[in-house]
Amino acid sequence: DQQVKQNSPSLSVQEGRISILNCDYTNSMFDYFLWYKKYPAEGPTFLISISSIKDKNEDGRFTVFLNKSAKHLSLHIVPSQPGDSAVYFCAARPGTASKLTFGTGTRLQVTL
Amino acid sequence: GAGVSQTPSNKVTEKGKYVELRCDPISGHTALYWYRQSLGQGPEFLIYFQGTGAADDSGLPNDRFFAVRPEGSVSTLKIQRTERGDSAVYLCASSPGTEAKNIQYFGAGTRLSVL
């Protein structure tokens, strides 16, 4: 039972354009959401997060949008840079537990 | 300061053997987590510690898996009678506390290969 889903295994975007990565969840108890970025042979690195009381959080080139009614969140990267090429994981946690539930990841490739 | 350190970075073992994987969290972090990532999947939760005690071990797949954190800092994940299906990257994370605002910081992982 995949509670956090990333339906696009890969995405290719040109440098300078916008990258949009999507994530859906099924557990209505989730109230905190995070995006992690992972390079090969490294651990996941925290990127940005959002609480369920908000619908948008922005940090530099990265913006996360949350649509609670649709149980959907997205990560926007603009402008995309070659160094953004990595696997991006969406993760979620309920207020009552510390463990994170991850999606299967989306591999982003930013081309020149 | 230093990040989360995991040793060894790679471990190759034979089916049926016992292995120990070590995690050294960020200094001062009270919460420590173990996850397992299989090929093509996201990390899956195994267990987490708040201080020395296991606060949630609901992700451990069976009783061959055990973890300890005796002094509230370094943790060891122990796997008995390893099986080929145990092959994965084992990730450790730590955080200053367990509230949602406390981000989990991950180590580079230990890649376990069971032959």
Image: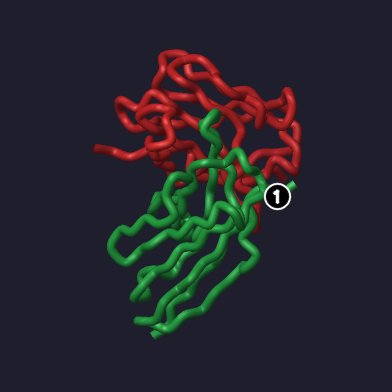
Quarter containing the N terminus of chain B:
top left
Identify residue for label 1. Answer: A2
Q: Could you tell me which residue is drawn at 53 percent across and 27 percent down?
A: B48
**Residue A33 in the image: x percent, y percent?**
49, 47
Subunit of mark 1? A
| Relative horizontal placement of residue B29, taking residue B56 as reference (left or right) | left
In the depicted structure, whether residue B90 falls above or below residue B53: below
**Residue A82 point in image, percent of width and height:** 37, 75
Q: Residue at x 43, y 70 (%)?
A: A85
Residue A74, position as x, y percentages in the image: 50, 62
Q: Can you say whether A73 is above or below A16 in the image?
A: above
Residue A79 appears in which quarter of the rendering?
bottom left
Q: Colour of chain A?
A: green
**Would residue A81 be seen by someone viewing this image from the given angle?**
no
Classify B108 as above or below A107. Answer: above
Which chain does the red colour mark? Answer: B
Q: Amino acid at mark 1?
A: Gln
Residue in front for this viewpoint, A43 or A46: A46
Q: Position of residue A46 (x, y in %)?
A: 40, 50
> Label 1's element?
loop
Of residues A87 and A99, the one nearer the viewer is A99
Name the quadrant of the C terminus of chain B: top right
In the picture as drawn, the residue positioned furthest to the front comes out as A69
Tell me if residue A22 can be seen: yes
